[in-house]
Amino acid sequence: MTQEVRPKRRAVREYSQLLRIQERLLSMLQEALDEIGAPTTLNLLRELRNRTGSRGLEDFGRIANSVEAAIRDLKLLQSDVQKELLDDRSDISVEGVSNLPAPLARFLAERTQNEHFSYEVRQDAVRGWVIAWKEYTAAGIVRGFGQFYERPYAWLDE
């Protein structure tokens, strides 16, 4: 049986969602690792070992190693997904804009595959590149809209 392969260009949104999931997982794993290595946890395990002869400290050491390995694997997968996104990003170009910053280009790359998405790119003297966008439902009703700036807080400096 052959598996249907979708073109990479259409997977940009899925890659972005996968990156967000990986960030959440990484945060949870890091929190678990911090909890395992916390002084209160280690003191509790030492106290248990001294009173009962339990091998909890060694078990927690193995668990910590497993969590660290999971974090490394997750970061490797994350870098692979980011590489795929960057490869896809070369396909995204905005007419008349040759040097769109990476966060703005990524925003467009994630959403331009959606036929109900429209945007306008302009340049502001203070805030740099500005993307004004709208997303519509299939019925043509505005689902969401907003603006993204290259330098959103630049006006505070003046």
Image (cartoon, rainbow, N blue to C red):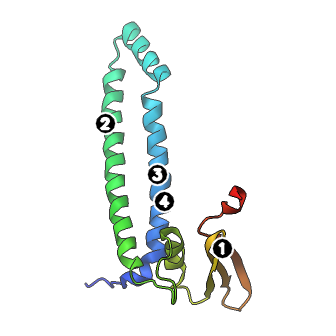
Question: Tags 3 and 4 in contact by the CB under 8 Å rule?
Answer: yes
The x and y percentages for residue 87 are 35, 75
- Which residue is at a point 46% across and 73% down the rendered structure image? 14
Spatial CA distance of label 2 from label 1 is 51 Å
Position in image of residue 75 (x %, y %):
36, 53
Nearest to N terminus: mark 2 or mark 1: 2
Badge 3, how many Cα within 10 Å: few under 14, some, many 20+?
Answer: some
**What amino acid type is highlighted by mark number 3?**
Leu
CA–CA distance between discs 1 and 3? 39 Å
Q: Tell me if 95 is positioned left or right of 146 in this view.
A: left
Q: Which amino acid does label 2 sit on?
A: Asn
Q: In which quarter of the image is residue 63?
A: top left
The disc at residue 25 is 3
* Alpha carbons under labels 3 and 4: distance apart: 6 Å
Q: Name the residue under label 1.
A: 125
Mark 4 / mark 2, whichever is N-terminal: 4
Amino acid type of the residue tagged 4 in the rendering: Ile
Q: Mark 2 points at which residue?
A: 65
Badge nearest the viewer, 1 or 3: 1
The amino acid type, in three-letter code, at marker 1 is: Ala
Question: Percent x, y for residue 134?
Answer: 67, 82
Chain-order first, disc 1 or disc 3: 3
**Disc 4/disc 2 C-alpha distance (Å):** 22 Å
